[in-house]
Image: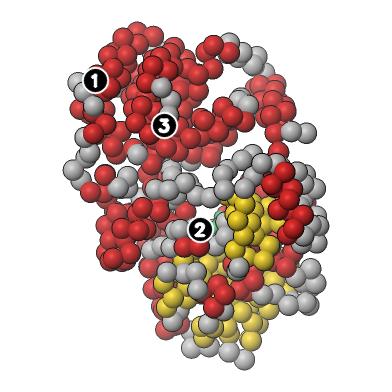
Amino acid sequence: MNNDQRRKDKKRAYYQKQGRQETVVSPQKIGAKLRADAASVLFEILENGVSAKQALNSRLDAYDSRNAAWLQEMVFGSLRKLPTLQFWLRGLLDKPLKGNKKVLEHLIMVGFYQLTFTRVSPHAAVAETVGGAEFLRGDSLKGLLNAILRTFIRENTALKEPENPAAAAGLPNWIFKAINEHYGELAHDIIKQTNQKAPLWLRFNPHKIDLENFLSALNESGMPTQTSLAHTTGVICEHSTNITALHGFDDGWFAVQDGAAQFAAPILAPEAGDKVLDCCAAPGGKTAHLLTLQPDIRRCVAIDSDPDRLARVDENLARLGLSAELKCAEAQDLDAWHDGELFDKILLDAPCSATGIIRRQPDIRWLRQKTDIAPLVAIQKELLAKMWQILKPGGKLLYATCSILPEENVQQIQLFLENNSDAEVLPIEPIYAQYASVVCPTGLQILPGDGHMDGFYYALLQKRQ
Ligand SMILES: C[S@@+](CC[C@H](N)C(=O)[O-])C[C@H]1O[C@@H](n2cnc3c(N)ncnc32)[C@H](O)[C@@H]1O
């Protein structure tokens, strides 16, 4: 089944479940509806704190793949440029819009985004954006929108930049400050990378297809690719695509997994007969990689505290023809799930700030707050302590985060080593370490863009016998 058909079926099922009629938008109005949807999604993310994924998902299903990609581009692009768009809006809108009209501010910003950062013609950008107001109960404000967008073009507003350097960099002050404080001369590059679009990485299953055939299948679908020395089963795709429409998806030939995330399984390197625990497993990317890399794992337990996300582990493993013991629990609550058996290998891919993947998920920069960091550091510390209790002497634990903040990474591991005299840090093989901008005695800090990868931290710990 192709991706557009899949989308249509999902959309129909969604409306049936709600007992509602599908709204049919005439082809002439699709452009305007897309702008209205982009504004609604931005409203949900920025005013209600909903994740981009959640806000976008059901709306993407309403469109064919080309329009779905365009909707996502308008949302992600606007999130990357938000402070600049807001700065322009404040300059051109005399009085802020309030209540149910607030969404129209987001529609205006979607207009600015198209006029400045895309190749949409100014005429189409203005007409479709103003048309979008109809779908947002904003007919009465169409004149205002039209006037603002036309003034924006006439006065070359796009040449004005916010003075605050964090705003000009498209980041909240606290993230901008943290990157500059911790990374000194690397900061400029990290910020630049953080504002790029992340490439699509795939990991193929060598038990189902080899590299040569996988690359030719991708090339036949019109996808230019690159490979990387350290990723024996990884491929970088040069543009994004609907992966579910790619040949072999339903047959489990491959999974989507960033290059940095693809380091976890080979660094932990499970051996035949090992008992392996993946204690923050959902949606299961690394569980699947561990099982693919070492099919003779004796026992693989995958835990996640979020039942909906754990269901995705089940789905993902099933598609890839793999299986694990799935447990829904707070991993640190050993009484709730642990049967007393010690593990040879533990992967702790801890909940974290996700500051290493902002370029892939641009909503994170606005949803994550500075005050979230201390509670995250506390849960990481607790998870480390508890997982250490159930690791066999001689066993290995790989601590991972997709963060670039030292308090979640290097400092967390330094503290752990101070508190656990039976722990030592093992070096990570140069084939992986060579890609990381920062290699320190406690682990690897991969920064966004290193080897085309997301920002990630790895520390490999061994429990003394
Ligand atoms: C970084 S994601 C894991 C990504 C996953 N390892 C993969 O590669 O697909 C962190 C996960 O930890 C889960 N989590 C958060 N706190 C947890 C806890 N106390 N115990 C178990 N899982 C937890 C979250 O629900 C989330 O799915």
The amino acid pointed to by label 3 is Thr
Residue 92 placement: quadrant: top left
- Apparent side of residue 98 relative to residue 330 in the rendered image (left or right): left
* Residue 94: percent from left, percent from top: 19, 21
The amino acid pointed to by label 2 is His
- Which disc, if any, is residue 118? 3
Q: Which residue is mark 2?
A: 452
Mark 1 or mark 3: name the one nearer the start of the chain: 3
Q: Give the class, few, some or many, for how many residues have Cα within 10 Å of label 1's Cα (few <14, many ≥20).
A: few
Disc 3 + disc 2, Cβ < 8 Å: no
Mark 1 or mark 2: name the one nearer the start of the chain: 1
* Residue 359: percent from left, percent from top: 45, 49
Q: How far apart are the two marked residues, 1 and 3, measured between alpha carbons?
A: 18 Å
Asked if the residue at label 3 sits under 8 Å from ligand 1, the reply is no
Residue at the image point whose x is 77% and y is 51% from the top: 252
* Residue 28: percent from left, percent from top: 54, 11
Residue at the image point whose x is 45% and y is 58% from the top: 449
Residue placed most toward the observer, 88 or 235: 235
Q: How far apart are the two marked residues, 3 and 2, measured between alpha carbons?
A: 24 Å
- Which disc, if any, is residue 407? none
Q: Which residue is mark 1?
A: 154
Specify whether residue 77 is in view.
Answer: yes
